[in-house]
Image: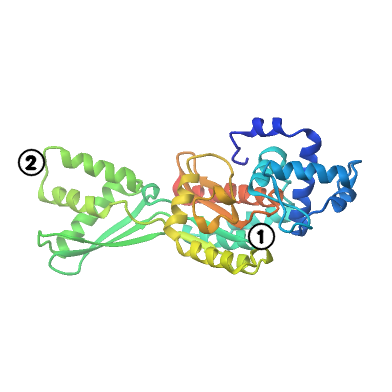
Amino acid sequence: MAKRSQSKSRSSNLIDQRTQQVLHGIIDNFISNTEPVGSRTLSKTLGLKLSPATIRNIMSDLSDMGYLTQPHTSGGRIPTDKAYRFYVDQMVVADKLPEQIQQSIDRISVQGLAVVQELLINTSQLLAGLTQFASLVTAPKTSVSRLQHIEFIKISADRILVILVTKSGLVKNRIIESQDQLSQEFLNLVSGFLNEQFKNHSLGEIREKILQSMVEDKDRYNKLLAQAIRLGKKAFELDMPVELFIEGQTNLLMDRRFIEKSTLDSLVSAFDEKSSIVEILDKTMEGVGTRIYIGVENDLSGLQDCSLITACYGNKHNMLGTLGVIGPTSMDYRRIIPVVDYTAKVVSRTITSQSYD
């Protein structure tokens, strides 16, 4: 389910089973209490017959290997990003999703939403509520959206407004330029032709067919077809930015694990960089299953005190978009991973049945 580290077997071979159990206990304890873990506390809760002195020696070894750090000389230790990566790759078996949580997620598929945008906003709000972290959901890429209707409206002698409506209910507007002095009546004919030819096709398919037509012998085409190809090329440019829905930023700002002002400032700046976040989420679509990025594994510097858990949604033909949550590196991975995973499955099922199959 999780994105696995390539050094999985090598890492486990470097740590014996007893040391792994101690590390596992420290991480579980810190996730639960968010307080540095001491050897005496661990000896009482670990369930192993180890003295505090033995546990201190193991903790010292783990610190030397980069799995633990000690904020204060006389205090306990806390896990590092390396420890959480080890925990996720080696030890975590995601908890079974409680039936009540499943039912909450299932409701997004039975609300009869006619517009995909509304589904994705609701999904983002749901994830933020269930996890108490920040949630991210990207809308499907324009190229995989299917055409419902296109319309050209003349707004000046050389400028035309294009209104593009997809089957999912998304509306895209753009202004294109034309030097051909086309009347509104003629533009209506072009709209009718393109709607007749390409309704229910994906915008990516339409653009490919139009580009193919342009390289063929133009003398074969009458004025209507030639203009339809010319205007269609401009109308179906696929450089529109991917829409990103974010909810729950205040959940992080209120989380006591982000008490340092510098960390809060970094988080606020990171959420302002929507294009960078979309770029990161795009990369997650290259893999399958749930993907987990811990601390410094995040490309965006403002998120390097956080973990990002994502999963793609899509249909049998394409991955359409990504959803996920951002929270502290000490989040309860066993609880959060199945929430993200199951939500992606429900969104996939819902969005496919509506307009992307």
Q: At 37% across and 57% down in the image, what residue appears?
A: 241
- Residue 243 in view (yes/no): no
Is residue 323 positioned above or below 220 on the image? Answer: below
For the residue marked with disc 2, what is the amino acid?
Asp
Q: At 61% across and 33% down in the image, what residue appears?
A: 7
Q: Answer left or right for 339 relative to 206.
A: right
Question: Callout 2: helix, strand or loop?
Answer: helix
* Marks 1 and 2, how far apart at CA: 60 Å
Q: Which residue is the site of mark 2?
A: 219
Q: Answer left or right for 19 relative to 270.
A: right
For the residue marked with disc 1, what is the amino acid?
Leu
Place residue 16 in its image quadrant: top right
Q: Residue furthest left?
A: 219
Give the crowd class for mark 2: few <14, some 14-19, many >=20 residues within 10 Å: few
Of residue 141 and residue 329, the one placed in the foreground of this image is 329
Q: Which residue is the site of mark 1?
A: 130
